[in-house]
Amino acid sequence: MRLPNLNALRMFDAAARHLNFGRAAEELHLTQGAVAQQVRKLEADLGHKLFHRHARGLSLTDTGRSYHAPVGQALELVRDATAKLAPAVQQVTLSVPPSFASKWLVPRLPEFAAAHPGIDLRVVAEESLTDFKRDGIDIAIRQGSKPQESGLNSALLSLVDLVAVAKSDSALTQEEQPELADLAKQSLIQDGHRHWDLLLRREGLTATGRILQFNQTALAMDAALNGQGIALVPRIFLGGQPLDVLWQVPRLGDQGFYVLWPSAASRAKAVVNWLLSQ
């Protein structure tokens, strides 16, 4: 049997990692049809079915799974060997929550680029759990309690110090040192973490004003900037924002923004050090 086409193997590897032809096509900058066609041709050449096709994705057959392991390793060896020929630019993929990306990371990217011209930092905005190997992620930042996953390094970037904020110069900012009971009478804005609901329930209070609900912290902040009420947001998101802090929320244990990276990913270390220095 002659060796398969290298491009077909690359497409098979991407499809096997993503279990989705569309996402594999995005990674390879090809059309979904081109990837699916090459994988079908590879299956025909090998005489084996590599994937089960489902309405919403793929799953590997037993043959596909056993074939992908050495193919993926071989392609990684090729990538590593090629990278050693041109080590000047390293690509590092960083996965962060969307609101963290827009309110904290993006304003700092010019500084990172100036400090690390040899690193091509690619940012993926997502909140789902990350499979570092399958998704091609080098570093992730996630909000929550201290991670306990084995095989991962973790470091605290910042505790989630929540503050209640409103648009500067609005009527809401004129009261001095309001209490939670005072804030409960105003229009409140909360994100998918639903911190207002939790705080009010814990203190036995009920919101008498409306609660405007968004799924992202960045959207809740934008609503506050437009004078639509009081939002609860992490203090580290406030840099340069025309928002006034009305109230500091009691600390939520070890809730924080944590940097995660596989212990073997040495190329990520420079990015991790830069993140922690901020």
Image (cartoon, rainbow, N blue to C red):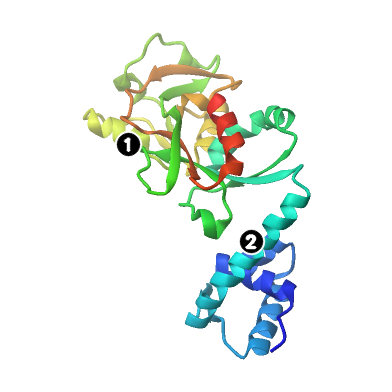
Q: Position of residue 60 (x, y in %)?
A: 51, 76
Residue nearest the observer in this picture, 40 or 233: 40
Residue nearest the observer in this picture, 189 or 123: 123
**Amino acid type, callout 2:** Glu
Residue 158 visible in the shown view? yes
How far apart are labels 1 and 2 at the CA level?
A: 48 Å
Residue 14 visible in the shown view? no
Graded by Cα atoms within 10 Å as few (under 14), some (14 to 19) or many (20 or more), the crowding at tag 1 reads some
Residue under the image location 57 percent in, 71 percent down = 70
Instruction: Assign a secondary structure to mark 2.
Output: helix
Quadrant containing the C terminus is top right
Instruction: Assign a secondary structure to mark 1.
Output: helix
Graded by Cα atoms within 10 Å as few (under 14), some (14 to 19) or many (20 or more), the crowding at tag 2 reads few
Residue nearest the observer in this picture, 151 or 53: 151
Quadrant containing the N terminus is bottom right
Q: Quadrant of residue 98?
A: top right
Q: Earlier in the sequence, mark 1 or mark 2?
A: 2
Q: Position of residue 13 (x, y in %)?
A: 62, 69
**Amino acid type, callout 1:** Asp
Q: Is residue 224 above or below residue 38?
A: above
Q: Position of residue 180 (x, y in %)?
A: 31, 21
Residue under the image location 30 percent in, 30 percent down = 199
Is there CB contact under 8 Å for labels 1 and 2? no
Q: Position of residue 272 (x, y in %)?
A: 56, 35
- Viewer-nearest of discs 1 and 2: 2
Q: Is residue 229 above or below residue 94?
A: above
Q: Which residue is mark 2?
A: 76
In the image as oriented, which residue stretches furthest toward the left?
Answer: 204
Q: Which residue is mark 1?
A: 197
**Mark identifier at residue 126:** none
Left or right: 65 in relation to 28? left
